[in-house]
Amino acid sequence: MSKQGSSFKDVLQNVFAASAILIAFIVAEILFTQVMANPVNFEGGNPAGRALQGNILGTFTKVVRLFLF
């Protein structure tokens, strides 16, 4: 009986770990697309353009896109 209890506990831990990772990816995607890649951070309101002078969010977005895409 204790083996089933520990098995259920292991399954619960695995489900929690998987959901925590999934939630972290979703939050990171929302933060990147809605805050950092906001058109306000770029010249002319165009995220494909240059980041505004001294705007760290726009600059960081450009650096991340350079390495990821």
Image: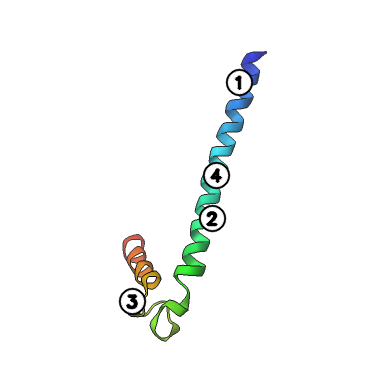
Q: Residues within 10 Å of mark 4 (few under 14, many from 20)?
A: few
Q: Residues within 10 Å of mark 3 (few under 14, many from 20)?
A: few
Which mark is nearer the camera, 2 or 3? 3
What distance separates the C-alpha of mark 1 from that of mark 2?
30 Å
**Amino acid type shown at disc 3:** Gly
**Amino acid type shown at disc 1:** Ser
For label 4, the residue is 20
Q: Is residue 26 left or right of residue 61?
A: right
Q: Is residue 44 left or right of residue 1?
A: left
What distance separates the C-alpha of mark 2 from that of mark 3?
28 Å
**Amino acid type shown at disc 2:** Ile
Q: Residues within 10 Å of mark 2 (few under 14, many from 20)?
A: few
Q: Earlier in the sequence, mark 4 or mark 3?
A: 4
What distance separates the C-alpha of mark 1 from that of mark 4?
21 Å
Q: Earlier in the sequence, mark 1 or mark 2?
A: 1
Q: Describe the element under mark 3 as helix, strand or loop.
A: loop
Q: Earlier in the sequence, mark 3 or mark 1?
A: 1
What residue is rendered at 58% in x and 38% in y? Answer: 16
What residue is rendered at 60% in x and 20% in y? Answer: 6
For label 1, the residue is 6
Q: Which mark is residue 26?
A: 2
Residue 47 position (above or below residue 14): below
Asked if the residues shown at circle 1 and circle 2 are in contact, with their CB atoms under 8 angstroms apart, the answer is no
**Amino acid type shown at disc 4:** Ala
For label 3, the residue is 54
